[in-house]
Image (cartoon, grey):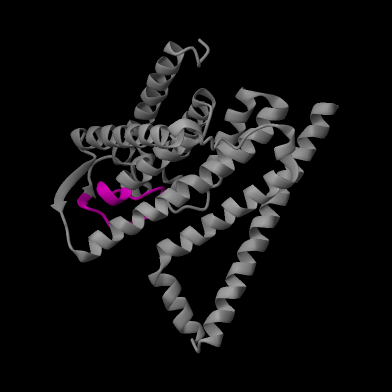
Amino acid sequence: MNKIRTGFILAGKILLLAVAAMALLFAVCLAAVLIGLLTGRSVDQMLALLSETAPWTIIVQDAVIVASVLILYALYERKKGWSLGFTLRRGRAVRETIAGLVFGAALITAAVLLIWLLGGIRIRGTEWNAGVARALAEGIAMFAVVAISEELLARGYLYGLIRFSYGTRAAIAVTSLLFALLHFGNDHLFDSPWAVLNLILVGVLFGALREWSGGLWIPVGLHMAWNYFQGYVYGFEVSGVRVESLVRVERAGSEAVSGGSFGAEGSAVTTLVLAAGWLAAFLYYRSRGRAAG
């Protein structure tokens, strides 16, 4: 009975978080509209500006998620003693973020290389101009904020809530499923079963790294590098979203190999790479006594 009651309380807290985020986002949008009207812009002009500044719109949305999480954590959870995972002591943040960035870049590079070797893509060349350079710079800011907000939400707040009441395995399992669920609105997600499976698997990898490393810095770095290199460097869609890229590619052969319109995350090859990444991380942390056998 206590577990059932705790489950309802957790569901209520998650619902409260959603309501808080929507309320903050509404307030931000209302303020933006009022500023636009006061400065003489028409509705069409504001919509055009919104389209032109899409990366920064995403940054604002994710900043709202971060603010909502921090507010609810401070109000209801901090006194319970569990951490969101952003530990700042002795240079840990920089060291582990760099480790996550390197690991993430290595994993997505391995996936892309295997997809190419198996005939899933053709490389058309590279492109470099002022527009690409600007997009690459904006992409760093956008995917940094996306990684921070999604990891703070999934592996910080939700993970902490569930782990505090139900333990580590439940926290990893539930947050991995919720992480996949957060992407259900993305284009082309259901074109292939591999996309949903890979979102769950990457959630398991992030959750395991959150537990084994004792913080969010490695998951944040991995998340950011994975998205950035997949889209802005290698030219794949990122979870179904097309971005400007340094390398130009075109899909070829089976979508089970190429990933189709969802990007490399829709490929069966990526499933194997994520499994290998989890195994590598497990062996590393077990050698340090931080992952159970």
Residue 184 screen position, x and y as percent: 53, 48
Position above or below: 3 against 230: above
Residue 213 screen position, x and y as percent: 49, 26
Report the span colored magenta.
231-249
Picture quadrant of residue 83: top right
Foreground residue, 95 or 42? 95
Q: Going by the image, does 18 lie left or right of 148?
A: right
Position above or below: 59 against 69: below
Question: Is residue 197 at all visible to an observer of this figure?
Answer: no
The quadrant of the picture occupied by the N terminus is top right
Which residue is the extreme one toward the front?
90
Indicate yes or no whether the magenta region holds residue 240.
yes
Indicate yes or no whether the magenta region holds residue 45.
no
Residue 138 screen position, x and y as percent: 35, 59
Query: Residue at position x 26%, y 48% from top?
Result: 233
Query: Residue at position x 35%, y 55% from top?
Result: 139
Position above or below: 135 against 47: above
Number of on-image labels: 0
Foreground residue, 98 or 107? 98
Query: Residue at position x 74%, y 33% from top?
Result: 80
Question: Is residue 31 at all visible to an observer of this figure?
Answer: yes
Query: Residue at position x 16%, y 57% from top?
Result: 127
Foreground residue, 286 or 254? 286
